[in-house]
Image: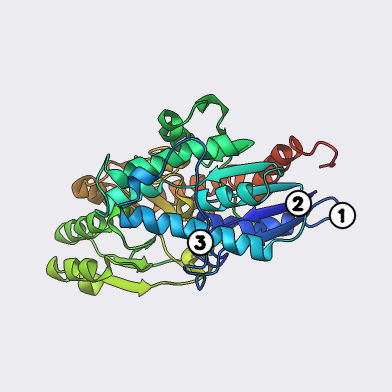
Amino acid sequence: MNLLQALFFPPEQPGGVSSMIPYLQERFRSSRWEMDLFWLPKRIRNKGHEEILFETFDWTPFAESPIVQKYIQTYRDYLWWTRLRVNKKYDLIHAHHPIAGLAMKKVFPDVPLIQTLHSSYERELILNGVIVENGLEHQFLVSLYREMEHVSERLMTVSLSFAEYLSPYIAEPSQIGVIPNGFDEKRFKPVSHDNSIPQLVTVTRLVPAKGIDTLIKACAELKKRGHEYVLHIIGDGPSRTDLESLAQSLGIYNETIFYGYTLHPEEFMPFFDIFVLPSRAEAFGSVFAEAALSCLALVGTNVGGIPEQIEDGVNGLLVNPDDEIALADALEKVIADPSYRYELSRSAWEKAKSLYSLTRVANELKKTYLQYHPGTKG
């Protein structure tokens, strides 16, 4: 079977999709399977001029929004690039972004399309203060879910929580498939180490939706309580300057290291002790699975797909978002008790190896693909 994995961002872009798809390609390399990757290069801007029509709604009432205009133009650009560069015949297309799926189905209407939705762009924009709930942009973006359902042979997502989130926006919620992201176990090598001062780490984009302001406030509370630690913040984004100022104003700048963007954090993640990310929304939270495979203790928030990975008190700790005291309490538990920290990290590692291995996810995807091309052997 000839497969095309249609991405939006290039494979080296940090995030859940890029953590999986390039490595998935290796698992499909055989005489029975052939897989290509396709994405829109960042340099492609304002090339497309095609008229855009959706089959399930009229987008023009939303056209006065610059954000909607930009989205439509990006869709035009993806269409232009697809028509220019994809000349091969594929048996199946698996898209990992709404724009990628819509463009592929328009260019190749007779090729079965599987569409996986990995995150909610509208929720992120709302939490980051870019758009308002129920405003023009919000209405436009949630309308796309019904369009995706209409044009896809199969609509899928990465967590039960996100499938539930999608339910009000589509016609047949019971038909949504759920396959979590998978991670190549060989990339994660837990390292036996003994840090005299506990090392906390987070890996994320620095935007309000990720709750790093709550983390910094919690760490200031830990310092007040007399705990020693180092907080490593790996990632970059528009909130970085504000977060650095917050750490300085709360007196923990010396305990906090801002790394900026790092391409392969999994290479040195095993040398830390505790992974913490107090997200305000998370469709799946791939970085938790990556931290678990690195054998770190996990501390996260009770939102989105995170509780599907973390069972509170068993393989990590969960707190409510925006609660810096509860977060400080959870961190205090794993900082003060190395044995408990080890138990949590070991349980997290075992669950991640079992449920989120790339081998398991690849097998699930093969079963799904074969439903649309039954002549191919697994």
Mark 1 vs mark 2, CA separation in Å: 15 Å
Residue 250 locus on image (x, y percent):
14, 65
Q: Amino acid at mark 2?
A: Tyr
Task: Decide if residue 365 is on the left or right side of residue 291.
Answer: right
- Identified at 29% across, 47% down, the residue is 330
Label drawn at residue 166: none
Name the image colouring: rainbow
Residue at horizontal 85 percent and vertical 50 percent from the top: 32
The first of marks 3 and 2 along the sequence is 3
Mark nearest the camera among 3 and 2 is: 3
Name the residue tied to disc 1.
31
Q: Picture quarter containing residue 37?
A: bottom right
Amino acid type, label 1: Ser
Classify residue 207 as left or right of residue 58: left
Which sits in the foreground, 94 or 62? 62
Provide residue 225's location: percent of width, then percent of height: 16, 57
Q: CA distance from mark 3 to mark 1?
A: 40 Å
Q: Amino acid at mark 3?
A: His
Estimate how packed mark 2 is, as few (under 14), some (14 to 19) or many (20 or more) residues with alpha carbons within 10 Å: some
Q: Is residue 37 visible?
A: yes
Q: Secondary structure at mark 3?
A: loop
User: Sequence-wise, which precedes: disc 1 or disc 2?
Assistant: 1
Q: Residue at x 50, y 70 (%)?
A: 42
As helix, strand or loop, the secondary structure at mark 2 comes to loop
State the residue position of label 2: 90
Q: Is residue 18 visible?
A: no
Assign the C terminus to one quadrant of the image: top right
| Residue 49 marker | 3
Query: Looking at the picture, how far across and down is residue 251, in whole percent?
Result: 14, 69
